[in-house]
Image: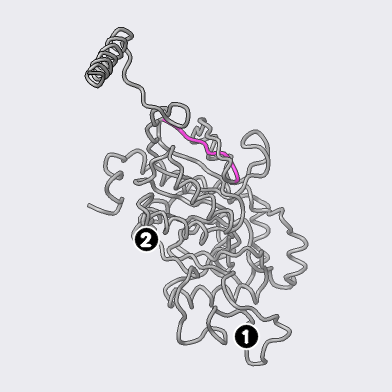
Amino acid sequence: MNGRLNCRAWACGLVLLALIGCKNDQPPVSKTNGPPVAAATPATEVKVVVITMFELGEDEGDEAGEFQLWKARQKLNKRFAFPQSHHDLFLNEETGVLGMVTGMGTNRSSSAIMALGLDPRFDLRNAYWLVVGIGGFDPLDASIGSGAWAEWVVDGDFGHEIDAREIPEDWETGYFPLFTKEPYPEVMPPNQGEVFQLNGKLTEWAYQLTKDTPLSDDEHIAEQRKLFTKYPNAQRLPFVLKGDSISSMTFWHGDLMTIWANKWVKYWSKGQGEFVSAGMEDTGTAQSLFYLDRAGKADYDRLMVLRTASNFTQPPPGITAAENLAAEGEDYAGLELALESGYRLGSRVVDTLVGGWEKYQNNLPYEP
């Protein structure tokens, strides 16, 4: 008897709770260990990521680094806090162009790109990635203010090194690949991040699109060109070419180091690459995008690298490397010219991709 009464009381209690719930017009609430979770905000689709590496001061209104021209001219006005990396992000909501400053060096570039690629606020699966920054150029290949599109980016830090004062007499350099015993061995060791090949068809497309773009010049640079009497390309007006990049955390300079860079790029690209520009970040960027592609977060085939010449990797004839580096320091005479060239060339690519997004979202520009 008591059991039946208890069951009836329990059933009445359920009815009463249901009536209370209906009266208050509230859905059932499940208990959790924390506050209510807000509905997820849809990720912002990004069409192009413009990757710069440094800014000199503020993002606008003072002496420009690599980012300022892009922020102003592409109207990158919506700011996204990015405390997990070097610099906040800026977006043009109408065009879908996102600008970033990674910080200098492969360590900062790799961490910045990875942090962005894993950021849930952005959908980067169809985004194009444009590295656009200054660099030191080989005077054999180009002049100050010129721009080079790379297909190969080679790391200049990953290896063995013996001080030049202690190397064997028959060695031309004390720098050689990991897991080898001498410079440039015939049997190449496995690639562990020493070299990245970009999408050559996309590189060619960017080059063809921009190769006839008029580039600025100035009187001071014109006078500096005259010093490079043995280098015809260094004496030309700024122009556009295809040429490959070496990344190194060490700012190296001089005739012998430039010879090494040429051989190092040739070696790791198996003779297909041609050293033109020296920077500090490109292999870090490529490495992170390679991993993000593997995770389905980005498309490695949509990476482009554009470097513009702010200085040369070696001095003009008659001046030592130490004298030239001391005189030049970090105050590159060609900085402003290189920044303008970077924007003129890079913006043609960005504007073309955004303007044709209906096609380029799902098809690479060289595809029918």
Residue 358, can we see it? Answer: yes
What x and y, as percent, mark residue 355? 34, 38
> Mark 2 to mark 1: distance in Å?
33 Å
Q: Earlier in the sequence, mark 2 or mark 1?
A: 1
Q: As rendered, which of 53 and 236 lies closer to the eye?
A: 53
Quadrant of the rendered image containing residue 208: bottom left
Identify which amino acid the numbered label 2 is placed on: Asn
Q: Judging from the image, what secondary structure is the residue with disc 1 in?
A: loop
Reply above or below: 74 against 113: above
The N terminus: image quadrant: top left
Question: In the rendered view, how is the structure colored?
Answer: one colour
Residue located farthest toward the front when viewing the structure as drawn: 1
Residue at label 1?
172
Q: As rendered, which of 159 and 144 lies closer to the eye?
A: 159
Q: Tell me if 7 is positioned left or right of 251 in this view.
A: left
Residue 208, can we see it? Answer: no
Identify which amino acid the numbered label 1 is placed on: Glu
Q: Judging from the image, what secondary structure is the residue with disc 2 in?
A: loop
The residue under the point 31% across, 40% down is 357
Residue at label 2?
199
Quadrant of the rendered image containing residue 181: bottom right
Q: Tell me if 366 is positioned left or right of 110 in this view.
A: left
Residue located farthest toward the top when viewing the structure as drawn: 23
The residue under the point 41% across, 47% down is 349
What x and y, as percent, mark residue 183? 56, 84
Residue segment shown in magenta: 86-93
The residue under the point 40% across, 27% down is 31
Circle 2 residues within 10 Å: few <14, some 14–19, many ≥20: some
The residue under the point 59% across, 42% down is 87
